[in-house]
Image (cartoon, rainbow, N blue to C red):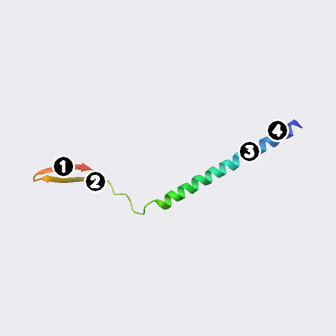
Amino acid sequence: MVTLETRQKIEESHQELEEKLTHQVSEIIEASETVEAQAPDRTPAAPAWNFSMPFAGVRYYTYD
């Protein structure tokens, strides 16, 4: 009798864990889908060297 009760409790705890895991996985999938839907379609600009010339012959270089 004791082993039957223990087995039943183990099965119930496995079921609860499986339900929690399924719920968490579905939340993660939904969150990733919403992030993908909100992401812009354009690709980010690649970093490049830029310069500005505030005075003749003077250049300030920046890497963006």
User: Local crowd at mark 4 within 10 Å, few (<14), some, or many (≥20)?
Assistant: few
Distance from Cα at disc 4 to Cα at disc 3: 12 Å
Count of numbered badges drawn on the protein? 4
Q: CA distance from mark 2 to mark 3?
A: 54 Å
Calculate the distance from the C-alpha at mark 4 to the C-alpha at mark 2: 66 Å
Residue occupying the point 82% across, 43% down: 8
Q: Quadrant of residue 14?
A: top right
Q: Residue at x 60, y 53 (%)?
A: 27
Q: In the rendered view, does 35 fall on the left or right side of 47?
A: right
Q: Earlier in the sequence, mark 1 or mark 2?
A: 2
Ranked by sequence position, the earlier of labels 3 and 1 is 3
Q: Are marks 4 and 1 in contact (CB under 8 Å)?
A: no
Q: What is the three-letter code of the residue carrying label 1?
A: Tyr
Residue 6 is labelled as 4
Residue wearing tag 2: 48
Disc 3 designates what residue?
A: 14
Q: Residue 36: give x, y in percent of width and height.
A: 49, 59
**Mark 4 and mark 1: Cα distance apart in space:** 75 Å
Q: Secondary structure at mark 4?
A: helix
Going from N to C along the chain, the mark reached first, 4 or 2, is: 4
Distance between the alpha carbons at the discs numbered 3 and 1: 64 Å
Mark positioned earlier in the residue sequence (4 or 1): 4
- Secondary structure state at the residue bearing disc 3: helix
Q: Which residue is mark 1?
A: 60
Tell me if mark 2 has few (under 14), some (14-19) or many (20+) residues whose alpha carbon lies within 10 angstroms of its own: few
Identity of the amino acid at label 3? His
Name the amino acid, label 2. Ala
Outermost residue, bottom direction?
41
Residue at x 37%, y 57% (from the top left corner): 44
